[in-house]
Amino acid sequence: HVVESASLACVPPVDVTYKPHFPPELLSSGALSRVQLEAVVYALQQHERRLPSGSRAGFYVGDGTGVGKGREGAAVILENFLLGRKRAVWFTCNTDLAVDAKRDLRDIG
C-alpha cells in the first residue's frame, strides 16, 4: 500500500510528455507496478532535458522502503539502453541490494 503525504498531494503533478520505448510484454507482464512506472516515466522525461553544461538532467526517486526503487532503476537503465545509451552505473553500499539489483535487471529485461 503506497501512501502520499498531504503536502505532496497538494502539488499538481508535472504533465507527462515522455513515451517509453519498452517492449509491450514488459508493461503487460506486471514486472513494473503502476506506481513504479509513474516514477520511471518522470525520470526518463527528466533525462530528455539538457542542463546548460550539456549534461542530462537527473531525477531523485524518494520512494519509501518496499516500493521498488531498484526495479525503477532497472527500468530506467533498460530504456536508456534501448535508446543506445549503453553505459550505466549502479551504486550501493549494501551487498543484499547488489543481489536485488541483479535480480531487478534480469526481471526487467
Image: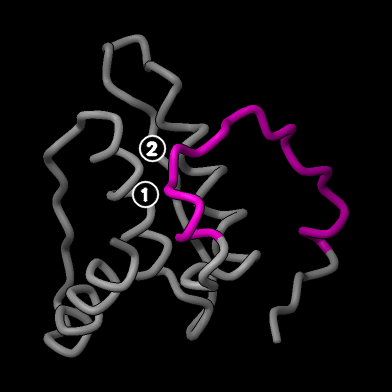
Q: In the image shown, does 52 or 100 lie closer to the viewer?
A: 100
Against 42, is 90 above or below?
below
Which comes sooner in the sequence, label 1 or label 2?
A: 2
How crowded pointer 2 is (Cα within 10 Å; few <14, some 14-19, many 20+) is rated as some
Could you tell whether 100 is left or right of 42 in the image?
left
- Residue 64 point in image, percent of width and height: 53, 77
Q: Nearer the viewer, mark 1 or mark 2?
A: 1
Could you tell whether 59 is left or right of 36 in the image?
left
In the rendered image, which residue does mark 2 sit on?
58
**Quarter-of-image position of residue 63:** bottom right
The magenta segment is 7-27
Residue at image position (42%, 62%) is 72
Amino acid on which disc 2 is placed:
Gly
Considering the whole magenta stretch, tell me its main secondary structure: loop
Q: Of helix, strand and loop, which one carries label 1? A: helix
Magenta-drawn stretch contains 9: yes
Q: Of helix, strand and loop, which one carries label 2? A: loop
Residue at image position (16%, 84%) is 99
Q: Which mark is residue 76?
A: 1
**Residue contact at pointers 1 and 2, CB within 8 angstroms:** no
| The N terminus lies in quadrant | bottom right
Residue at image position (69%, 79%) is 2
Q: How is the image coloured?
A: one colour
